[in-house]
Image (tube, rainbow, N blue to C red):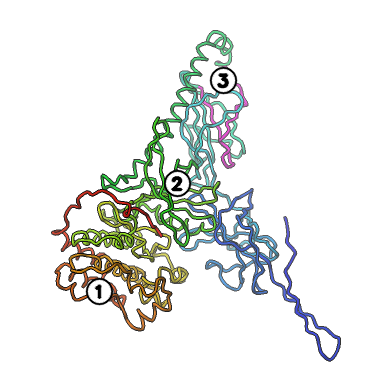
Amino acid sequence: MERFCGFGSVLVACCLMSGASVMVHTVSHSTCKSCGPRPASSIGHKCYPDCNVSKVCPNPEDVCAAVWWREAGIVTMETMCHNPARPLYSVMLKDYSSAECLLISKHVAGRNLRVCACTGDDCNKHVLLSKLSDQEELTRPFKLRKLCRFCDIEYSTCNATGVCESTCNITSICESPNEVCVGAWKRNEGISSVETVCHDVAFPFYGQYLTDNNSSTCVLKPVKGTEEEFYMCSCNADECNAKLIFNVPPLKDKRTCLPVLLVSLVPLLVVIVLLVSSFYIYRVLRQQKLKIKGMESEIFINDDDHSDSSSAKANNLNHNNELLPIQLDSLVGKGRFAEVYRAKLKQGLMSAGEAFQTVAVKIFPYEEYASWKNEWEIFSDSELRHDNILHFLTAEDRKTERQYWLITAYHERGNLQDFLSKHIVSWEELCRLGVSLVRGVAHLHSDQMVSGQPKVPIVHRDLKSSNILVKTDLTCCLCDLGLSLRLDNSLSPDELANSGQVGTARYMAPEVLESRIDLENIESFKQADVYSMALVLWEITSRCSAIGDVREYEPPFGKLREHPCVESMKDDVIRDRLRPEIPASWSQHTGIQFVSSAIEECWDHDPEARLTAHCVMERFDDITSAVILPISSEPKSSEDSGNDDK
């Protein structure tokens, strides 16, 4: 086992003025790998993070530490300096004197984490996948679930000799630790097929118990008692069923007549092989085409039909590593963590004329893995789907470009802030924009679906007009969920506190500006969202023609400060209790007066006094059910384009 013995040292010398004597004192500081969450790779029982950054620890008592977890098939590690006297992800480490970082397993906040610490320079550059029990110091390495080829039945041109390469290109993580990789080869009426799956050895496979599951290779053995040629094998290494090995001759009764058949049926065999090969190629190409079309069919983003995208594929990263055929068009938005592009998704593989569908692609650099992963995990929740939340297609790890992509619907009218700066809206349009905004927020905050099924509430935490898109039918949809938080009941106050002071200062609620949000009550996070939603409703109302003369667009709290900081907003919002102006003319229109009353209740200084999003939605429904009219189709102009998803 490799050991690390070097330590960084800081030399402190004190020269005495009265003589030549020198007193030297040495304080040792460890040097450790120190990177945020990064993808990691495993070799044997060692795991290596994608981290090349080392730093000298600030305190002499610090040791090197690492945290390891795996979600949705992605292995991730975080490395750092750590004071062993303090908990690491709520885990107190008992042993940190070893020169190797030996992971222990803990169940923290509803997920399995593995943490470790060690002593020695860069000793956390890799970790050992092991576990500690309560009574034992060290036990055997823990067993990871297998990665196996998993394609069910695929047609094959392999004969019962040599090595048969599986044509399956899908790799799956087995559901149970007891499952191994299994392969089966059949030939029935001259047609050969290969099946690759995960299977629990405690149960029979095609009526046969697997007895060779400790092998690292999949060696096929004949299954007797069947009318067709049937071989199967099992093995216990990652993707070991990608190659199926024949090392025994075919069954005896069939072997005796094989030479005669080969001599008499060579022409027929050649024809069969050609037909099977042609059929296989046709099937593979057709499946690829149907797969892409199936994904595209879930994106209804044809503006002429007023139907925007939805996503049945939103629950996983492209599982077989096949990237969608996307061509980036133009940059339409840029935020703190990513850039947003208008792009073309190719429709179909075999069409003579290239047909495209317009989508939006949010591109994160590799350094922003954590931001991409958080937004992807929020989007991938099937409970999130709603007409007033940006519809999500898929996420991709573009290794070649060292980028992470989120692919969503594209809305040509752009974000609400740009739309309001260029358009004055009627009362009917105000209702349409306002009620759709409130419905989107209410769905995020809700703890149940329309069907009554339970749902985990989500808070946006960065609601503002530039993070809301305008659809063709003049309804809103929420976007940019990178700072969103799932309000899981298992979250502790400490974990909620670690979420930090996030959002945009101009739209922050008073309690967020003052960092005094009630962490014991998850409703307090929703109340902060409602405050931000009220400011956006004020922006929409301020551009409505029903109030008479309409001023030029301006964001909440005016244009005096283009990008106000938290401290300056504290002066206005907390010390002076300022809110955007509600002119007297707003009271002259019954509907506008209703909206302004709801706005004032939503930005109340006391979070407990604010309306909920559901209550505002019910108020809007009462008044808008009689006034919302269909919006006539009008030609799109250049000023309606753009997708500034910041």
Q: CA distance from mark 2 to mark 1?
A: 44 Å
According to the picture, the residue beneath numbered tag 1 turns out to be: 601
- Quadrant location of the N terminus in the rendered image: bottom right
Q: Which mark is residue 251?
A: 3
According to the picture, the residue beneath numbered tag 2 turns out to be: 328
Secondary structure of residue under mark 3: loop
So how many labels did they put on this image?
3
Where in the figure is residue 417, as x and y percent of width and height? 33, 62
Q: Is residue 247 left or right of residue 594?
A: right
Looking at this view, name the residue that lies furthest to the right: 20
Query: Do tag 2 and tag 3 residues touch (Cβ < 8 Å)?
Result: no
Where in the figure is residue 8, as x and y percent of width and height? 72, 69
Residue at image location 82% in from the left, 90% down from the top: 17
249 within the magenta span: yes
The amino acid sitting under disc 1 is: Glu
**Camera-nearest residue between 328 and 170:** 328
Secondary structure of residue under mark 1: helix
Where in the figure is residue 430, as x and y percent of width and height? 22, 62
85 within the magenta span: no
Q: How dense is the environment of label 1, judged by Cα within 10 Å: few (below 14), some, or many (20 and up)?
A: some
Secondary structure of residue under mark 2: strand
Classify 340 as above or below 216: below
The amino acid sitting under disc 3 is: Leu
Q: Is residue 259 left or right of residue 600?
A: right
Indicate the quadrant where residue 618 lies. Answer: bottom left
Chain part drawn in magenta: 229-253
Looking at this view, name the residue that lies furthest to the top: 264
